[in-house]
Image: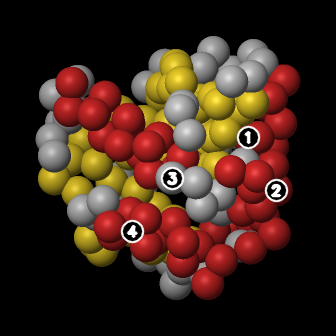
Amino acid sequence: MTLRIVVDDLTGDATLRLIAAHLAGMHDLTPAESVHALDAGALADPAVTVWSAWHGEQLVGIGALKQLDAQRGELKSMRVDDRFRGTGAGRALLRHIVDAARQRGIRSLWLETGADEGFLPARRLYESEGFSLCGPFADYRPDPLSVFMTRVL
């Protein structure tokens, strides 16, 4: 599958629907106090860049990079539309964000994801792309429902 990955301005209906679906999915799997996913307003923060991946006119997925400081970035809002799961789209989007982080001079990437079995495919993807377990970072606190990972670039 050929993907076109672009910086997203968060104004398109398809993107906003996928962000809403992502948030709903996080709340379905995790109690509200342990959900760290960002809504469209928070993703519009100047410290965050959101990319969308397209196959033709169909939105395949989204992912974001939050600049924590000059050398650290946080992976946010990785979501592939259910219709495209298992196609390699998530891996392609993740690799695109890793490359963009390197180009910005970021030296390490960090992420928080869920500890529940529903997050296992995401954790396996991150592990296969060089992320390893770590403790909480930035403003996160220990949470048995969260898994923290990092990768040196």
> Closer to the camera: disc 3 or disc 4?
3
Q: Secondary structure at mark 1?
A: helix
Residue 17: % across, % down? 83, 36
Residue closest to the far front: 1
The label on residue 125 is none
Identify residue for label 1. 19
Q: Secondary structure at mark 2?
A: helix
Identify residue for label 3. 88
Q: Earlier in the sequence, mark 4 or mark 2?
A: 2
Question: Mark 3 packing: few (<14 Cα in 10 Å), some, or many (20+)?
Answer: few
* Residue 37 visible in the shown view: no
Q: CA distance from mark 2 to mark 1?
A: 9 Å
Mark 4 near mark 1, Cβ–Cβ under 8 Å? no
Identify residue for label 2. 24
Query: Is 4 situated left or right of 126 in this image?
Result: right
Amino acid carrying mark 1 in the image: Ile
Residue 67: % across, % down? 35, 33
Amino acid carrying mark 3 in the image: Gly
Query: Is 120 situated left or right of 54 in this image?
Result: left
Q: Earlier in the sequence, mark 2 or mark 1?
A: 1
> Closer to the camera: disc 3 or disc 2?
3
Q: Earlier in the sequence, mark 3 or mark 2?
A: 2
The residue lying at 74 percent from left, 73 percent from top is: 29
